[in-house]
Image (spheres, rainbow, N blue to C red):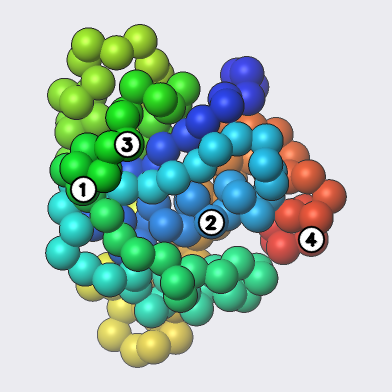
């Protein structure tokens, strides 16, 4: 297990499914130990309802999340160099993170997390795919950062 970072940026394709779940989960599990944000390669979707539903099962609120892109972060004055660690949850976001940070001294990690969008026919099979992605994020997060603090541990499954 590596050192616990002071600031983490999670990223994926649209900042609507995986990275919002990861951001909210890290805040729930580890509280104020790190500054945590998320972004997408593009911002062309609102937060996904299935992500909201499977996060709610663990007491994690996602419905107020507003998607944003790397470009919007830059426009709003957020500098990627302020993060100690960027965790990419999709190949496209890993490429973008590496490109945008090639002149910065910070770590970019790739966690290959299932993209649950488009999987499953029924509501229950879709929820199952989203739970699988959520659980993959939890497993990688606990493996990387250690057991959740006490208040976040109950929901960690």
> Residue at left 35%, top 64%?
66
Q: Is residue 152 left or right of residue 80?
A: right
The residue tagged 1 is: 72
The residue tagged 3 is: 78
Compute the Cα span from label 1 to label 4.
Answer: 35 Å
Q: Earlier in the sequence, mark 1 or mark 2?
A: 2
Mark 2 and mark 4 in contact (Cβ < 8 Å)?
no
The residue tagged 2 is: 24
Q: Earlier in the sequence, mark 1 or mark 4?
A: 1
- On the image, the x and y values in percent for residue 111 come to 40, 37
The residue tagged 4 is: 154
- On the image, the x and y values in percent for residue 107 come to 40, 19
**Closer to the camera in the image, 107 or 66:** 66
**Closer to the camera in the image, 65 or 11:** 65
Q: Which numbered mark, 4 or 3, is in the foreground of this view? A: 3
Q: Is residue 58 left or right of residue 110?
A: right
Within 10 Å of the Cα at label 4, are there few (<14), some (14-19), or many (20+) other Cα atoms?
A: few
Compute the Cα span from label 1 to label 3.
Answer: 9 Å
- On the image, the x and y values in percent for residue 9 come to 41, 38
> Residue at left 57%, top 26%?
6
């Amino acid at each position: 297990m590596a050192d616990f970072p002071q600031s983490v940026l999670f990223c994926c394709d649209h900042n609507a499914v995986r990275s919002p779940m990861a951001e909210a989960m890290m805040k729930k599990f580890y509280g104020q130990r790190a500054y945590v944000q998320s972004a997408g390669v593009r911002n062309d979707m609102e937060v996904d309802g299935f992500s909201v539903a499977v996060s709610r099962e663990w007491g994690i609120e996602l419905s107020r999340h507003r998607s944003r892109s790397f470009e919007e972060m830059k426009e709003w004055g957020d500098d990627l160099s302020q993060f100690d660690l960027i965790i990419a949850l999709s190949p496209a976001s890993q490429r973008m993170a590496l490109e945008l940070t090639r002149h910065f001294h910070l770590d970019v990690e790739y966690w290959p997390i299932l993209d649950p969008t488009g999987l499953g026919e029924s509501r229950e099979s879709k929820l199952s795919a989203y739970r699988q992605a959520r659980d993959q994020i939890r497993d990688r997060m606990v493996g990387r950062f250690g057991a959740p603090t006490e208040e976040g541990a109950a929901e960690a499954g």
